Image (cartoon, helix red, strand yellow):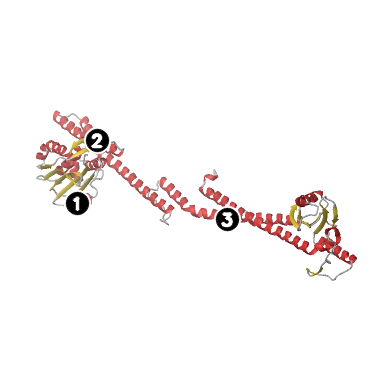
Amino acid sequence: MIFHSIRWRILAWNFALLAATVAVLLVAFYRHERQNRLQAVDLSLRQIMTVDMGAVIELVPSLNPRGNPAPPPPERNGGQARPRPVESSAARKSRAEESINALASQGVWVWVANVEGTSLYRSSNAPSEAAIMELCQEAVREEAASNGPAHPKDAIIAEHAYEMLVHRPPGQNFVIFGTSTAQLAADLRQLAWKLFLVGLGLTIVGCSIGWILAGRSLRPLDRIATDAEGIAQGDFGRRIDLEDTESELGRLALVLNSTFSKMNEAREKVAQFTADASHELRTPLTVILSESQGTLRQARTAEEYQATLETIKQSALRMKLISDALLELAQGDAGRPVAQDRCDLADLADETVALLGRLAKEHGATLVSHLENVPVVGDPGRLSRVILNLVMNAMVHNPAGVKVEITTAVADGWAVLRVVDNGQGITPENLNKIFERFHRADSSRSRHTGGAGLGLAIVKQTIEAHRGTIEVASELGKGTAFTVRLPLAA
C-alpha cells in the first residue's frame, strides 16, 4: 500500500501536525475577532443608550416616575452630541422622535415595555417576535419588584440574530436597545470561509514543502537501496557513496559498506577456497586416472602392477588427507562445539614428542622439550593435532639438522605453548599469509611432502575455538617461533 512508503508516512504526520496547528491558530483568531466585533456592538449600544435615553424618556413619560422634565434630546453634529436649549414639550417630543428615527437609520431599534409584557413604545424598525420580549422579561424577572431596582440595571442578550441591551431603570418598565446581527453573522461567515481557505492554502503549501524536504532527506536511502540492488545483482565491488558520515544515514552507509566489504571478502575467500580445493583434489585424481588407464592398456609384470597400485594408494591417501582437512575446517566454520574436558598441555606435548621420535630421526631433526604442567579445558584430540601440526611443520619444512624446542608454561594467567625451531625462517610476505587456507611458503617442497596448505589454517581455527590466540615470529636464517595462548583451567 501507498502508506507503506516512509515518505508518505512522513507526509501524513506532517499534514496532521500542520493541519492541527493551523486549525487551532485560525479558530483562536476567529473567536478573538468574533468576540471583538460583538464587544464593539455592545459598546455601541451602551453609548447609544447613554446618549438617547433622554429621548426615550420624553416619548415614554412613565419611565420618569419623579415627573421631572427629561433633558432635551442632544443635538448631533458630526457624530458629537451637545445639549440643546430648553424647548417646549411638543418641540422636545418632536426632537425625541427625530433621534429615535435617526437610530433606526443606523439599524438600532428601541422597545419599551413593562414587567407584565405590555408594550409601551416600539420604534418602527423594532422586531415583532414575542420570543424577544420573553427573553427580555426573563432578564429582568429577578428585579420585578413593584418599584424596580434601586439603581438602573443593564443586561446584554444575544439571541435570534439580535444583540440587545436591556436597561431596567427604577420602576416597572424596561428599555431595550437592539440591533440586528445578521450582517455581522454574514461577515463572520465570510471571515470563516476566508480563514478556512487561508488555512487550506497554508496546509497545502506546508505539505508541499514537507514532501520536497522528505524527498531530499530520503534521497540517501534511495541511493543506498540502488547501490545495494547493484551489489545483489553481482557488482560486488560497488560501494555506497558517502557524503555526510556524521549523520544517521552516513553511519548506516559506513556500516553497510563495511558489511559489503566483509561479504565480498568472504565470497572471494570461498571462491578461492573452492578453486584451491578443486586444484588440490585434481592432482591425485589425475594421477589415479593416468596410472589406472596406462595399466589397463597393456599387460605388465607383477612388480609394475605393484608400483602402480602403490602410486594409486599414495594419491588416494593424499585425497583422504585433503578431504579430512576440508571436513574439519567446514565443521569449525559451522561452529562445531568444543569439548570441555580437562587435560594438560604438558601431557599432550609429551605424547606428540614420543609419537614423532622416529619421524624426527628420518628427517635428521632434534626434538627438545621443556614441559611444565599446564591444565586447560578443551578437546584433547584437537589440541593434540595442533601440537602435532606445529612440530611436523618445523621438521619437514626445514633442512636436516634442525632443532625443534617444545615448551609449555604458565605466563600472565595464560597456558602457553611454544614451538621454536632454528631453521631457515619464513619471508615477511609469506609470514602475513601463513594461516591462510592452501597457502604454502614453498609450494614445490610442500607438494613433495604431501602438504596441502591446510594444517596451519586448522591450527588457527582450533585455537580460536578454544578462546585462545596464536602468534608467529620468524627471521630468515635464524628460525621460527609459534606461540599459543589458552585460558587456564580453573
Q: Callout 2: 10 Å neighbours few (<14), some, many (20+)?
A: few
- Amino acid type for the residue under numbered disc 3: Gly
- In the rendered image, residue 196, in percent from the top left (x then y), is placed at 65, 54
Vertical order, 433 against 282 (above or below): below
Please state, as top left, top right, bottom left or bottom right, where the N terminus lies in the image: top right
| Nearer-N-terminus badge (2/1) | 2
Q: Is residue 318 among the parts visible in the rendering? A: no
Tell me how many marks there are.
3
- Amino acid type for the residue under numbered disc 2: Gln
The residue wearing badge 1 is: 427
Where disc 2 sits, the SS reads loop
Image position of 156 (left or right of 323): right
Image position of 94 (left or right of 37): right
Asked if the residues shown at circle 2 and circle 3 are in contact, with their CB atoms under 8 angstroms apart, the answer is no
- In the rendered image, residue 84, in percent from the top left (x then y), is placed at 83, 70
- In the rendered image, residue 406, in percent from the top left (x then y), is placed at 14, 43
Vertical order, 321 against 175 (above or below): above
The residue wearing badge 3 is: 206
Mark 2 to mark 3 CA distance (whole Å): 66 Å
The residue wearing badge 2 is: 340
Quarter of the view holding residue 461? top left
Mark 1 to mark 3 CA distance (whole Å): 68 Å
- In the rendered image, residue 351, in percent from the top left (x then y), is placed at 14, 36
- Amino acid type for the residue under numbered disc 1: Thr
Q: Callout 1: 10 Å neighbours few (<14), some, many (20+)?
A: few
Vertical order, 321 against 263 (above or below): above
In depth, the one of 238 and 375 nearer the eye is: 375
Quarter of the view holding residue 31? bottom right
